[in-house]
Amino acid sequence: MATIKDIASYCNVAVSTVSRVLNNHPDVSASTRKKVLKAAHDLHYVRNTSARDLALQPTNSIGLVVRGSENPFFTSIIASIEASCEARDYSMVLHQIPVTADEVVEGARLVQSKRLKGLILLGGRYDYTREDVEAFGVPFVCCAYTNRFGKLDPADFSSVSIDDKVEAYRATKMLIDNGHTKIAILLDSAHDRSVSECRYRGYCDALADAGIPLDEGLVCETMDFEMRAAFERVTRLMAERPDVTAIFAEADIMAIAAIKAAHDAGLTIPDDISIISIDGIELSRFTTPTLTAFTQPQTLMGQKAVEILVEVLDNAAPCSHVRLETTLRPGGTVGHVRTET
C-alpha cells in the first residue's frame, strides 16, 4: 500500500506538498495538485485514519461495497447480506459507489477507515490482478460476479455467482427452440471483459450449436446499462431490421426498455417479437406481458456470500467459489416464431 512518501518520490515533490494536496490546502499549484492526486489514485493510496477515529469504530464489521447503486438487481441481495451478517453477530457497513468508480480503491479505503474484518464486493470488474486487491488486507468475496478474466489465484479470493455464459446460452436456446433464427442481443458491450462479454459468448455459442450464423447487425451494444440507452438502441433496431423476431437482453432493465420500444414501434409481444432476459427482478414482474426471465437467486446469493466470508474469518476456512443456477420464470414475452402462410 502506497504512503505519502511514495507519492512524493513518484512526483518528485516534497512530502509536505503531498500532505497539503491530500488535505485540500489552497497553497499548491493546479498542475502539482493534479499530478499528486493522479499519483495517489494510480498507486492505490489509502488515507490513514487517526487512532481516535479508529477507536470509535466497531471491530466486528463486514464491509459491503456496491458498485452501481442504481441497479435494482442489487436491492434484494443487499437486504439478504445485511440480515445474514446480523444473524452471525456481524454488522454490515454499506458503501455505495457509482458504476464508474473503482471498487478496489473504495474497498481498501473502507477497510482501513472502518477497521473491517472482511469485505463483500457487490458488482465489480472481472479482471482483478493480485496487485489490484493486495491493499484490502482482509478476506473478500465477489458477489454476483467472479474474476473470470483476471489473474488472481482462486485460493486468494471467494466468489458467489451464476455462470453468465451458461445462463446466456440457456436464454438464447429457449428462443431458438421456439423457432427463432433472427435473434438480437441487447447488451452493454460485447468486449468489456465483464458480464456483458460473458453473456455475449453464451449467445454466440448457442447460435453456433444451432447452426445459425452470427449476424453482427443484430448485436446491439449500448455502451451503457441505462434504460434510455437500451430503449434508443432497440428503437433503431426495429427501424433497421424488420426481420428480427426475438431479443435476448442481458439484463431485465434493458428488457423492460425493449418492451417499451417494441410497443412504440407498433409490435405485439410475443406475436411479433419475443423478448427474454437474465435477472428476474421484482420490477419485471409488472411489465405487460410479464417478462420471461431466467431469475438469479438473489437472496441465496447474499446468504452464501456472508456464509463463505464468515467461515474464512471465524474458522480459517479456505476461500471457495459457489456457482448458483437460475430458474426460469415463464412470463409471457416468449412465443413461437410466426411463419408466413
Image (cartoon, rainbow, N blue to C red):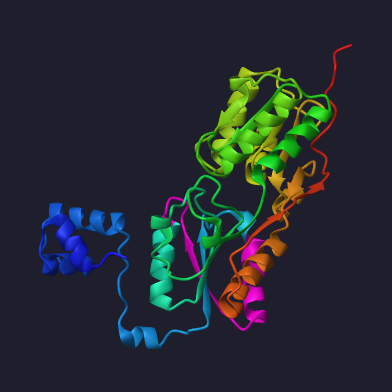
Q: Is residue 333 left or right of residue 199?
A: right
Looking at the image, which residue sits at the far top? Answer: 341
Q: Is residue 70 left or right of residue 212?
A: left
Does the magenta portion include 189? Answer: no
Residue 29 in sight = yes
Report x, y in % for residue 334. 81, 35
Report x, y in % for residue 23. 21, 70
**As rendered, which of 152 and 176 lies closer to the eye?**
152
Q: Is residue 246 left or right of residue 337?
A: left
138, above or below 56, in the image: above
Q: Is residue 157 left or right of residue 280?
A: left
Q: Which residues are magenta?
A: 75-102
146, above or below 201, in the image: below
231, above or below 142, in the image: above
**As rendered, which of 127 and 224 lies closer to the eye?**
127
In which quadrant of the rendered image does the N terminus lie?
A: bottom left
> Residue at 68% of width from left, 68% of height from top?
303
> Residue at 59% of width from left, 21% of height from top?
216
**As rendered, which of 315 and 173 lies closer to the eye?**
315
- Rendered image quadrant of residue 107: bottom left
Does the magenta portion include 91? Answer: yes
Report x, y in % for residue 243. 71, 17
- Rendered image quadrant of residue 11: bottom left
308, above or below 126, in the image: below
> Residue at 71% of width from left, 26% of height from top?
207
Residue 157 in sight = no
**As rendered, which of 200 and 228 lies closer to the eye?**
200
In which quadrant of the rendered image does the C terminus lie?
A: top right
